[in-house]
Amino acid sequence: MRLGVLDVGSNTVHLLVVDAHHGACPLPAHSHKTELRLAGLIEDGGAISEAGVDRLVAVIQDALRAAEDKGVEEVLPFATSAVREATNADAVLARVREETGVTLPVLPGDEEARLTFLAARRWFGWSAGKLLLLDIGGGSLEIAHGMDEEPDRAVSLPLGAGRLTHTRLPGDVPDPADVRALRRHVRARIARIVGDFARLGAPDRTVGTSKTFKQLARIAGAARTAEGPYAPRTLSRKALEELVPRLAAMTSAQRARLPGVSAGRAPQLVAGALVAEAAMDLFGVDELDICPWALREGVILSRLDHLPAE
């Protein structure tokens, strides 16, 4: 069957269309993406602005038309941290339902981590052993750890690259003092939960998902997207430590000229790199593997697991 997963994230609204059936690897058929940046449309009181809701409704309607054009049989919609934490979330969801017909479930943070972990486990397989998963989104950082498809521990921290850029790194080239302050904040927040994971034992493999990790790995010399999803890609902590000060000294336009970095993501790359560096350092990770699957694939895989076998 042809499924579409509609991801209303803090940065983008992304419709991923796949051909899939029970027991098979989902095959991507189409991708429809709009950079909405909901995190930047939140007012001082924590509510998504009226203009932001108007834009969200229009973008979802556009994605639904794309899904219909591509013959999607079922759309699996969900929203993440930007909607989850908005003070007017109920009103936003009601308006989306009224004007688009879409009931938009809001994933709790630990569920985001759990589903992303499922995708990474399926990608790397049982031979990868005990996994530590790190995923940097626009609004949050997800961390999960375990041996099975269901992680033993899964948490979500409010350390997304978009959120931190919007709230803590004003200006095109961030002030060094702001960078240092953000570095302290990120490390203190991650350090609070490191001990919980340490009790689970050392992982056999650490995996990084999300656009932030992919871009950082590409800048550090990993294979290009054109080389396909099966090309091995890694990111070392040493390379990241050298990269962070370089990124912090650049304008967004300069970052956008780096390999693998889009103009839309360039402004938040410094915050994302600080989170990645802190997580790898505090968890004692020297090198991680980049996983091409993440939350959207986890949602699809979870749905397929509940389909009857043909």
Image (cartoon, rainbow, N blue to C red):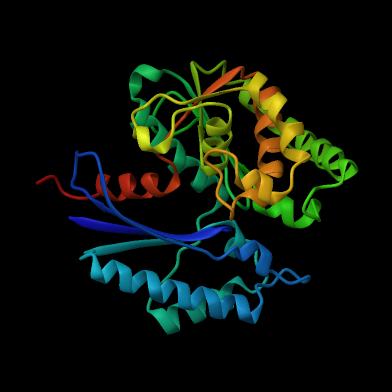
> Residue placed farthest to the left in the image?
310
Q: Residue at x 44, y 42 (%)?
A: 294
Residue 195, image x, y percentages:
69, 25
Residue that protrudes farthest toward the bottom in the picture: 99
Q: Determine the image quadrant of residue 191.
A: top right
Q: With respect to residue 176, does 100 lie above or below?
A: below
Q: Would you place residue 178 above or below residue 145 in this image?
A: below
Q: Is residue 195 visible?
A: no
Q: In the rendering, at what x and y percent does residue 223 appear?
A: 44, 29
* Residue drawn at the location 47% of the way across and 41% of the way down: 114
User: Is 230 placed above or below 22 here?
Assistant: above
The count of marks equals 0
Provide residue 277's location: percent of width, then percent of height.
68, 30
For residue 231, side relative to residue 260 (left or right): left
Tell me what residue is drawn at x 18 percent, y 47 percent.
21
Q: Quadrant of the N terminus?
A: bottom left
Q: Is residue 20 visible?
A: yes
Q: Return the residue nearer the eye: 216 or 16.
A: 216
Q: Quadrant of residue 154?
A: top right
- Estimate the x, y position of residue 165 in percent, counting from the top left: 73, 52
202 left or right of 290 in image = right
Q: Residue at x 79, y 51 (%)?
A: 169
Of residue 128 and residue 178, the one placed in the foreground of this image is 178
From this view, report whether residue 168 is shown above or below residue 70. above
